[in-house]
Image: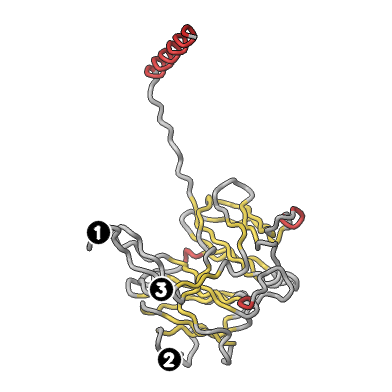
């Protein structure tokens, strides 16, 4: 045993000596140009047991957007309802091939494709990929929105928009929270499966009122938009900001969208709880404010 131990030590010494004589090696990792891509599931009548999977199938990467339920997991915090799974995620730029599958544990269902598309994603730009329309009626389609065209609204302004995912033509009024619902619509006659243009508003808390086009009973209770938060300091020291601001209507330079969804189709595999039995809205942010430091 002693002899074998000495030989092993000698081998280690020899290996270390050879390693010490080897020139240093520099490994350069290339920076891969990326785009930001988010997927919105707005199909009211079709899903696997766990919703839909959005997957790039041309390259292996960490852009995982799977088990996305109808309406992208609407979550209400402090009176604001936002779609928790509608987030931009980095994807390698270029011509990209993606597929939208049903998400399920049964292979025959999980391999079912709802959409199959190749799209050019440019580096440094953000994109919204939205699948919407009633699949059973043959009206389902996929739409790609280039979000990089959103202009900076300014340091004390925010950009506002509405996406109508199929709740019927709507009129939407955006007004300062606590104020009176205005007579004129901020976004008039927004058709099904379309996005309005952005409008600019002063920063502050903003509430959305959604009615059928031409007026009538609101589709749901008026909704408070994403508020956001200014840049802060992790040390609590004034003038030493190191935590980036959160986008919202209280933070200048932000852009925010209310997505208005139709009710889930009765008897389908989309959620069938009371909350999904009626039209509803959920907010997403589209543009981050400047860092400010």
The single residue placed furthest to the left in the displayed view is: 238
Residue 149 or residue 171, whichever sits in front:
171
Distance from the alpha carbon under mark 2 to that under mark 3: 19 Å
Taking the spot 36% from the left edge, 64% from the top edge, the residue there is 245
The residue to which callout 3 is attached is 227
Helix, strand or loop status at disc 3:
loop
Helix, strand or loop status at disc 2:
loop
Disc 2 and disc 1 in contact, CB within 8 angstroms: no
Distance from the alpha carbon under mark 2 to that under mark 1: 39 Å
Report x, y in % for residue 53. 64, 58
| Quadrant the C terminus occupies | bottom left
- On screen, residue 180 above or below 256: below
Report x, y in % for residue 168. 63, 82
Mark before the other along the chain sequence, 2 or 1: 2
Taking the spot 39% from the left edge, 79% from the top edge, the residue there is 205
The single residue placed furthest to the top in the displayed view is: 3
Disc 2 and disc 3 in contact, CB within 8 angstroms: no
The residue to which callout 1 is attached is 240
- On screen, residue 62 above or below 141: above
Distance from the alpha carbon under mark 1 to that under mark 3: 23 Å
The residue to which callout 2 is attached is 180
Mark before the other along the chain sequence, 1 or 3: 3
> Dot 3 surroundings within 10 Å: few (below 14), some, or many (20 or more)?
many
Indicate left or right for 194 with 1 as reference. right
Residue 171 or residue 275, whichever sits in front:
275
Mark before the other along the chain sequence, 2 or 3: 2
Indicate left or right for 89 with 42 as reference. left
């Amino acid at each position: 045993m002693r002899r074998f131990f000495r030989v092993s030590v000698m081998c280690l010494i020899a290996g270390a000596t050879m390693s010490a004589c080897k020139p240093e090696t520099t490994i350069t990792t290339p920076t891969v140009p990326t785009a930001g891509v988010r997927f919105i599931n707005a199909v009211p009548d079709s899903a696997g047991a766990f919703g839909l999977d959005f997957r790039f199938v041309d390259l292996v990467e960490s852009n995982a957007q799977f088990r996305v339920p109808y309406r992208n997991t609407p979550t209400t915090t402090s009176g604001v309802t936002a779609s928790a799974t509608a987030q931009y995620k980095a994807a390698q730029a270029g011509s990209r091939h993606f597929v939208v599958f049903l998400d399920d544990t049964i292979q025959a269902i999980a391999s079912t494709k709802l959409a199959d598309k190749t799209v050019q994603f440019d580096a440094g730009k953000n994109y919204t990929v939205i699948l919407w329309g009633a699949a059973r009626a043959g009206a389902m389609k996929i739409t790609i929105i280039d979000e990089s065209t959103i202009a900076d609204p300014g340091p004390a302004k925010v950009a506002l928009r509405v996406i109508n995912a199929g709740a019927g033509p709507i009129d939407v009024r955006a007004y300062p929270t606590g104020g009176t619902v205005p007579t004129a619509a901020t976004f008039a006659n927004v058709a099904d499966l379309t996005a309005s243009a952005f409008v600019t508003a002063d920063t502050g808390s903003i509430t959305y009122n959604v009615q059928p086009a031409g007026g009538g009973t609101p589709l749901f209770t008026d909704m408070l938009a994403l508020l956001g938060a200014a840049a802060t300091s992790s040390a609590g020291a004034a003038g030493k900001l190191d935590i980036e601001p959160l986008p919202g209507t209280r933070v200048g330079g932000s852009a925010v969208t209310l997505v208005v969804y139709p009710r889930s189709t009765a008897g389908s595999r989309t959620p069938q709880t009371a909350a999904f039995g009626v039209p509803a809205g959920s907010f997403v942010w589209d543009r981050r404010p400047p860092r400010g430091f």
